[in-house]
Image (cartoon, rainbow, N blue to C red):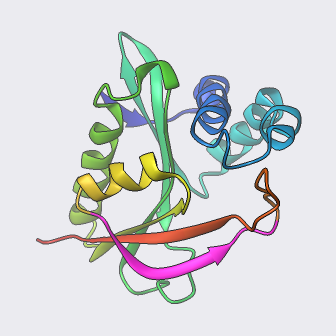
Amino acid sequence: MVRKAVVADAQRIAEIHISGWRTAYRGILTDAFLFDKLNVERRAKNLQKELADGAQEHYVAERDGQVSAFMAIGESRDEDKRGAGSLELIAIYVDPKLKRSGLGHELLEFLESEARRRGYKEVSLWVLDLNAAGRSFYEKNGYSRDGAIKTLERLCSPNGAPVEEVRYIKAMDK
């Protein structure tokens, strides 16, 4: 079941978010960043504010009555997509213990249904270029790279190379 997140979900979303980063990006980002800089309590406090002010929409997927995955969506933040009918998937994470359980796909289906219902022409998202599992997930669900790339200056790879994100797009056929 997918539902809109509420402030009371902040702690569980933070736990999924941080454990998701630590699992998905191990070897892509430094351990110092993943294990020393990321903090569940700090993330939960920030999420409480985000959920209260509603700047981004957060949704959760439950399994057996417990929040097990989440996503954040909003109008595209990209300059070339603003006002062009693009809904952005800002974040999507599944509890690492439940990877490949269908929860990520369930959230994507909900997102795409919402995009169509709201009249968006496309869904866009950014994924770390070196996140092969993430890229494969999106590609299996019909998303394609559109050629846009950005370097994330605040993140560092273990070998000191720049960390890049690539943008994926999926047209929302009516």
In the visual, does 66 lie left or right of 121? right
Residue ID at (76%, 28%)? 40
Residue 148: % across, % down: 50, 82
Residue 39: % across, % down: 82, 32
In the image, is residue 121 part of the stretch drawn in magenta? Answer: no
In the visual, does 171 lie left or right of 26? left
Residue ID at (38%, 34%)? 3
First to last magenta residue range: 143-153
In the visual, does 154 lie left or right of 152? right
Which quadrant holds the N terminus?
A: top left
Task: Answer with the quarter of the image where residue 119 lies.
Answer: bottom left
Which quadrant holds the C terminus?
A: bottom left
Residue 158: % across, % down: 79, 50
Q: Is residue 117 above or below residue 65?
A: below
Q: Is residue 167 above or below residue 102?
A: below
Instruction: Pick whichever, 159 or 110, lies toward us.
Output: 159
Magenta stretch prevailing secondary structure:
strand
Task: Answer with the quarter of the image where residue 172 lies.
Answer: bottom left
Q: Is residue 7 above or below residue 52?
A: above
